[in-house]
Amino acid sequence: MSFLNDLFIGLDAAKQEELQDRLDIVEHKIKFMDKMPVALLDVNNNPSYFLAEEIALAGGMLEADVFSAAFIIYYQPGKNLSDLMREVPTMLNAEWQAVKNNRIILLNDDVNRNLSAENAVSLIEDMAEMIHPGSFIFGHEGDKWIRFGA
């Protein structure tokens, strides 16, 4: 939670408590779930480790082998959902487990636009909803991220 501690500095106590409560809810629920192997790829299918801490806090583990990943999240700085929807289909491999199981997720690039404690906590919640479907519902699907059916 090191990067979050830096973001929490300067927030009033009530806001810190609210954000910590939100994180605690995610943390509590994922204690009872298996860690999900997640590959984070750019639009050239290169692995990325940019959101590794957020994925871990959401109950995932970054998987370098895309063939072993239960979920694939496409994220590229500077790319919005429309860009990703145009570019990702040609990059998918029908042999990947995540493609076979329709577990491809496109993440809009608003991750760093306003790096704040609120946005970081929202991203962790979104990641939890992405990789543990049915266990979390935070309501940002379709806006910040989408499930992409191959």
Image (cartoon, helix red, strand yellow):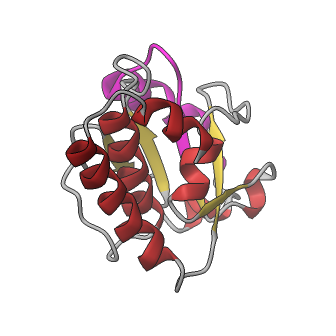
Is residue 92 visible in the rendered image? The answer is no
> Image point 51% across, 18% down: which residue?
77
Which of the two residues, 37 or 146, is positioned nearer the viewer here? 37
Residue 135 located left or right of residue 56: left
Instruction: Determine whether 128 is above or below 117 in the image.
Output: below
Residue 16 x %, y %: 31, 45
Residue 122 x %, y %: 32, 45
Residue 107 x %, y %: 42, 37
Residue 120 located left or right of residue 18: right
Residue 44 located left or right of residue 142: right
Question: Which span of residues is magenta-colored?
Answer: 73-93
Which of the two residues, 128 or 101, is positioned nearer the viewer here? 128
Is 44 magenta? The answer is: no
Instruction: Determine whether 141 is above or below 9 in the image.
Output: below
Which quadrant would residue 142 be assigned to in this image?
top left
Residue 56 located left or right of residue 113: right
